[in-house]
Image (cartoon, rainbow, N blue to C red):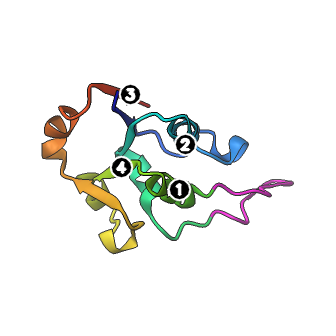
Amino acid sequence: MLTLQIIETAYRATLEEQDDPVVWITHAMRGAGAELAVLLRGNAVNYAVRSQDCSGLQLGEWKQTHAPGLAADLAGLTGKGVEVLAVEDDLVERGIDTDALLAGIALVPRARLAELLERFPRVWCW
């Protein structure tokens, strides 16, 4: 059954785990044959920006030695045939130009979200 994973909370557990748990589980479920799509909204639209780099992050004496690679994780999903979408209005509100996005990210205007949701028999919001 086709499932839409809506990711709205950005950078959840990325310092501890180096991956967003929802993006990670989407990879795992897709590998097991699940039919999935991902919709990025709110602050999570930042995941679609191609040139992210948080290496060099340091908090006191602690240094992040394995920085998250969320753009690469999303590119991996599209490479596995997972449709990845982003809410266009959320990009605009954050000043993110569409030229900065990964290839293969489909944009959906906020006004068409209800129409998009109708395509999916199951929707999970994270």
Crowd around label 2: few <14 · some 14–19 · many ≥20 (10 Å): many
Counting from the top left corner in percent of width and height, residue 95 is at: 33, 65
Of the 4 image quadrants, the one containing the C terminus is: top left
Tell me how far mark 2 sits from mark 1, CA to CA: 8 Å
Position of residue 82 in the picture relative to residue 12 (left or right) = left
Tell me which corner region of the image, top left, top right, bottom left or bottom right, holds residue 31: top right
Q: Is residue 35 magenta?
A: no
* Most frequent secondary structure within the magenta stretch: loop
Mark 4 element type: strand
Q: Give residue 27's mark.
A: 2
What's drawn in magenta, residue-wise? Answer: 54-68
Q: SS of the residue at dot 1?
A: helix
Disc 3 residue crowd, few under 14, some 14–19, many 20+, Cα 10 Å:
few
Position of 49 compared to 72: left or right? left
Query: Residue type at mark 2?
Result: His
User: At x 68% / y 48%, what residue is drawn?
Assistant: 18
The answer to whether residue 65 is left or right of residue 111 is right
Identify the residue under disc 1.
76
